[in-house]
Amino acid sequence: MNNLLATVITALVTDENDKAYFVQKDGITFTLDKAEGQHKVGDMVKGFAYTDLRQKARLTTKEITASRTSYGWGTVTEVRRDLGVFVDTGLPDKEVVVSLDVLPEMKELWPKKGDKLYVKLDVDKKDRIWALPAEPEVFQKMAGPAYDNMHNQTWPAIVYRLKLTGTFVYLPENNMLGFIHPSERYAEPRLGEVVNARVIGFREIDRTLNLSLKPRSFEMLENDAQMILTYLESNGGFMTLNDKSSPEDIKATFGISKGQFKKALGGLMKAKKIKQDQFGTELINN
């Protein structure tokens, strides 16, 4: 039976009962649920062969996302620390295991329920079906080229590779690849996690994207900095106050201390939102 499992076969309907048809291929009998369509004895039926949770031979005519020869997306449904993670690839009464042997050594980087894995299926000598995550080369072959006009756009991205150098992701809505440097994230995303990533650069050499999980600089500004920005915008983009101004003048205008004011100015200058000189502070029009 091993060579038939996790593949699409054409089998002969040889018998039936109230709930199922029994179909044969190479002397192996598979059960086909009658809820999937009407057939009669003698018909040839094309479907996906597998073993269910009870290790019974089954055939389904439903569309299955992954097989022995093709990759497809599976959704993580359960995590077992002693075994691996279970993924739903569309098989009735069957979730396929991704073994802990092919998952990250750090269990905190394992996929969680709801995460996405791009897998193909494999069958061992005991007729057990396993799911194998796609290697990087598979994504490189599947993805198309990115473009250099996507700066600051935010897109969902699925983590498919974890390295010390950073996180490799696939953008399903764009069919593109991206890379997240460790400096562009607060924590390392787990395998299969779907993240919202912002485009910060374009790699001409391989036409992939550099991405960030951090907000843009002005989105990280503290309330004091936002208050100063608003003040500048409402005053023609200029104010006579700068980091040399007296604490009294700063307090009178903004109601904050000089230390708070200087910290806010520093953040705005780092974000390239303002510039200052001996005459005051000016808003930079980006």
Image: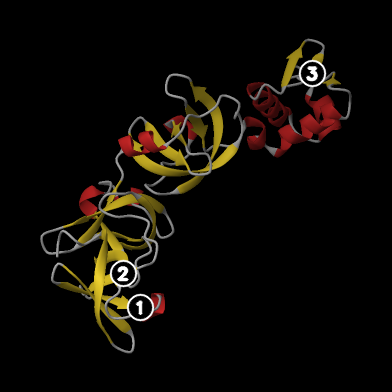
Depth order, front residue of 175/257? 175
Q: Earlier in the sequence, mark 2 or mark 1?
A: 1
Mark 3 or mark 1: which comes first in sequence?
1
The image shows residue 111 at horizontal and vertical percentages of 36, 53
Q: Nearer the viewer, residue 49 or 129?
A: 49
Q: Residue at x 49, y 29 (%)?
A: 210
Q: Which residue is mark 1?
A: 39
Question: According to the image, label 3 marks what residue?
Answer: 282
Is 72 placed above or below 245 here?
A: below
User: Does any portion of residue 47 appear in the rendered image?
Assistant: yes
Q: Nearer the viewer, mark 3 or mark 2?
A: 2
Left or right, residue 155 beside residue 19: right
CB under 8 Å between discs 2 and 1: yes
The structure's colour scheme is: secondary structure
Spatial distance from mark 2 to mark 1, Cα to Cα? Answer: 8 Å
Residue that sits furthest to the top in the current view: 278
Q: Position of residue 218 (x, y in %)?
A: 67, 32
Count of numbered circles in the view: 3
In three-dimensional space, the C-alpha distance between marks 3 and 2, rounded to whole angstroms, equals: 75 Å
Residue 56 position by quadrant: bottom left
- The percent position of residue 50, horizontal first and vertical second, equals 25, 66
For the residue marked with disc 3, what is the amino acid?
A: Glu
Task: Please state, as top left, top right, bottom left or bottom right, where the N terminus lies in the image.
Answer: bottom left
